[in-house]
Image (cartoon, rainbow, N blue to C red):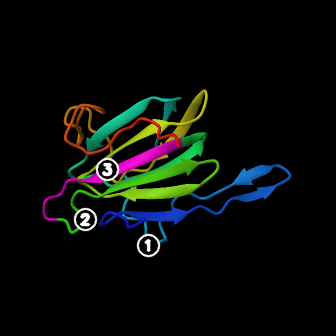
Amino acid sequence: MKLIQGVKTKSLQVIPDERGRLFEILRRDEPLFLKFGQVYCTTVDFAVVKAWHYHKRQVDHFVCVSGMIKLVIYDSRKDSPTHGRINEFFIGVHNPLLVQIPALIYHGFKGLTTPEAVVINVPTEPYQPKQPDEYRLDPHQNDIPYDWNRRDG
């Protein structure tokens, strides 16, 4: 898949032993690290879509640590060489992957597992409830050329 300009991914190395497993998500001494804002955890129920939004300043770092999600990103930046491109990532326990989403890129995700999936985000900015850096669209009624329905085949 050709990635949207500015998007980066990192396969996460899972280290299992008789006690369980461990994987690092993001380290300050790696090229993907930009700066620290906060860490938060969110869940998404099976078949629920949490989309679309973008940030003007914030860069997100998404990892699904339990279950599976379909993470979708869309480049609406008019001056971008990847304007109009969509990337889909199926991430979680079967595909441990960190996805870095730059500012100004619409993104959202859909829960693929029952009862829920658990997502960790390490954004570069702390959330400001009085002035959130978050700009939203309806997940289904918008100009983004993407259909969240499952494609059987």
The question of residue 63 being in magenta is answered with: no
Kind of residue at badge 2: Thr
Q: Residue at x 38, y 34 (%)?
A: 50
Task: Work out whether 92 lies above or below 45.
Answer: below
Q: Earlier in the sequence, mark 1 or mark 2?
A: 1
Is residue 100 among what the camera can see? yes
Q: Residue at x 74, y 52 (%)?
A: 21
Magenta region, residue range: 69-79
Q: CA distance from mark 3 to mark 2?
A: 25 Å
Please state if 43 lies on the left or on the right of 127 as rendered.
Answer: right
The mark total stands at 3
Label 3: which secondary element: loop
Q: CA distance from mark 1 to mark 2?
A: 22 Å
The question of residue 72 being in magenta is answered with: yes
Q: Are marks 3 and 2 in contact (CB under 8 Å)?
A: no
- Specify the principal SS of the magenta part: strand
